[in-house]
Image (cartoon, grey):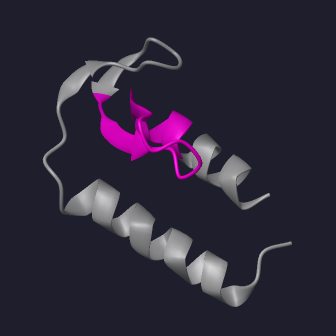
Amino acid sequence: MANFTELLNKGIRKYLDKYTKERPFGACENCQRYDLLICFEDPFDDNSIWKVCEFCYKELLNEEVV
């Protein structure tokens, strides 16, 4: 279970990634579906940046909190 601060930080990060950055169009690196992509930086691996669709991005964020 996540505490309030983790949930708040997740919401802030989700908003910034979705609305304030330029989003390219292409194939998702996870599901290969063509959509607007969000650059997801893995917090555990500094060199890992994935370009994923919004659906996969939500799944990655949910896995991160657990």
* Picture coordinates of residue 63, whole percent (x, y): 72, 48
The residue sitting at the left extreme is 22
Q: In front: 58, or 42?
A: 42
Q: Quadrant of the C terminus?
A: bottom right
The residue sitting at the right extreme is 1
x 60%, y 52%: residue: 61
The residue sitting at the bottom extreme is 4
The residue sitting at the front extreme is 46
* Residue span colored magenta: 36-57
Q: Is residue 31 above or below residue 7?
A: above
Q: In front: 42, or 54?
A: 42
Residue 18, quarter of the rendered image? bottom left
Residue 8, quarter of the rendered image? bottom right
Q: Is residue 49 magenta?
A: yes
Residue 55 lies left or right of residue 17; in this view the side is right
x 42%, y 45%: residue: 41
* Picture coordinates of residue 16, whole percent (x, y): 30, 66
Q: Is residue 9 above or below residue 30?
A: below
Q: Is residue 19 magenta?
A: no
